[in-house]
Amino acid sequence: MKVVISGYGKMGRMVEKILLEKNIECAGKSENITEFDPETAHESVCIDFTVPEAFRANYRFLAENFKAVVVGTTGWNDIRDEVVSYFEKCGTPMIYASNFSIGVNAFFAVTDYISSLLGKTGGYSPYIVEKHHCHKLDAPSGTARSLADIVDANMGTDVDIQSVRCGEIPGIHTIGFEGLNDRITMTHEAFSREGFARGAVEAAIKTESISGVHEFKEIVFK
């Protein structure tokens, strides 16, 4: 398998490190993926960690030219249906996630279970607090939005999300369920960006055996 990295910042360099560890060929790195060689692209999986504006401008090129695409960029949820439809039209496998950390995806599953129970009993109000480094462009984070979507679906309520941007925090997400007599809280804390990169590389490997478009949390434990 060959992998091309779109967006060679901190995440891109971490992805490259994981590829080397796993003896997966890095066929290229690009800050402007639309200038990448189409012939190499057709043989490669693209892992995209850019910024929302870049992905919005580039997703058609990705779908038209690459063998498969893994999208770790967030901040494009409002055009998700459009993006998914275009990848399906092109017949290009895509795996996307608000967070590729294996631990976070387990956190999603636990949140789904607890919020579904509390949604049946009633009496609890959910909230989310997310903290990230000062360089993060989107707020709330994609992970917080994913958590909120899960809870909204199970409890029929709009979840209050509070965002903090400070220093070099890799990512901390806390979800709470406040009741009259007790409180349930769960927290996931990332120690570094490495967990995101490892999950993205695992997703790239999974594109070899799937078709269509999938959210990582739907397939990570299968």
Image: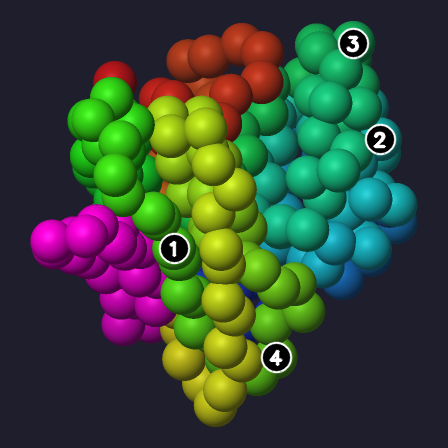
Q: Which residue lies furthest to the bottom in this view?
A: 167
For the residue pair 184 and 75, the one nearer the viewer reads as 184
Label whose residue precedes the other's in the sequence (2 or 1): 2
> Can you say whether 32 is above or below 58 in the image?
below
Residue 89's label in the rendered image is 3
Position of residue 167 in the picture relative to residue 90 (left or right): left
Q: Which of 32 and 55 is in front in this view?
A: 55
Which numbered marker is on residue 127?
Answer: 1
Region rendered in magenta: 172-193
Q: How is the image coloured?
A: rainbow
Q: Mark 1 or mark 3, which has the lower sequence index?
A: 3
Pointers 4 and 1 in contact (CB under 8 A)?
Answer: no
**Residue at the disc numbered 2:** 60
Kindly identify the amino acid type of the residue bearing the numbered disc 3.
Lys
Find residue 62 and report its image quarter.
top right
Which secondary structure, mark 4? Answer: loop
Q: What residue is shown at x 31% (from left), y 55% (from top)?
A: 175
Residue type at mark 2: give it.
Answer: Arg
Residue 199: percent from left, percent from top: 36, 45
